[in-house]
Amino acid sequence: MKYMLMIFGKQSDYEAMGGKPSDGPAWTPQDIKAMVDHMEAINNDLAESGELVTAEGLAEPAQARLVTTTKDGVPVISDGPYGESKEVLAGFWIVDCENIERATEIAARAYRCPQPEGAPNYPVIVQPIGEAPTP
């Protein structure tokens, strides 16, 4: 069964990773390398086990757009889909593994990602990917 493992963050986390302290300490290049090495190790292990479907890290929320429409269907576009204090999806894995316990095990490993002391650490959400209903 497929599962989506979601990691979250805030705009301020992206800024901290860019070297600007905000809600937490500024990340150093060594902090970034440790995080990337951790994520790459997970990806490599999942690829080797055949469980990795895909994984991506998302760009900072400041680059996102919120799109709605008027009643007439005219697109209404605004910068940033979330308030500054809201967490957003920062990255994800889609894995195809035996059961939710295995998906949870992978999520726990992702959660243990190294980061600077005092940086916010968000939970990893594991959600099964639904299958389309059969007609």
Image (cartoon, rainbow, N blue to C red):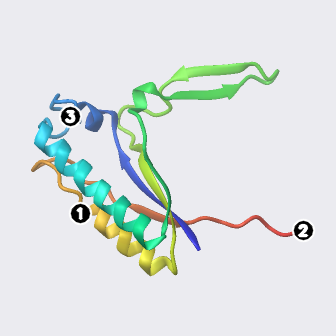
Q: Which of the pair 26/39 is nearer the observer?
A: 39
Asked if labels 3 and 1 touch by Cβ distance under 8 angstroms, the answer is no
Helix, strand or loop status at disc 1: loop
User: What amino acid is found at the position of numbered circle 3 in the picture?
Assistant: Ala
Residue 38 in picture, x, y percent from top left: 25, 57
User: What amino acid is found at the position of numbered circle 2 in the picture?
Assistant: Pro
Residue 21 in picture, x, y percent from top left: 15, 32
Which image quarter: residue 111?
A: bottom left
Q: Which mark is residue 83?
A: none
> Which residue position holds label 3?
16
Among numbered discs 1 and 3, the one appearing first in the sequence: 3
Residue at 29% of width from left, 67% of height from top?
109
Q: Residue furthest right?
A: 135
Q: Where 79 sits versus 49, above or below?
A: above
Which quadrant of the rendered structure holds the C terminus?
bottom right
Which quadrant of the rendered structure holds the N terminus?
bottom right
Asked whether the viewer can see residue 117, the reply is yes
Q: Which of the pair 32/8 is nearer the observer?
A: 32
Which image quarter: residue 42?
A: bottom left
Callout 1: few (<14), some (14-19), or many (20+) C-alpha neighbours within 10 Å? Answer: few
Judged left or right of residue 29, residue 109 is right
> Which residue position holds label 1?
112
Q: Which mark is residue 135?
A: 2
Among numbered discs 1 and 2, the one appearing first in the sequence: 1
Q: Which of the pair 109/44 is nearer the observer?
A: 44
Among numbered discs 2 and 3, the one appearing first in the sequence: 3
User: What amino acid is found at the position of numbered circle 1 in the picture?
Assistant: Arg
Residue 132 in picture, x, y percent from top left: 76, 64
Residue at 38% of width from left, 32% of height from top?
60
Q: Label 1, label 3: how many angstroms apart (C-alpha)?
A: 18 Å
Residue at 43% of width from left, 62% of height from top?
125
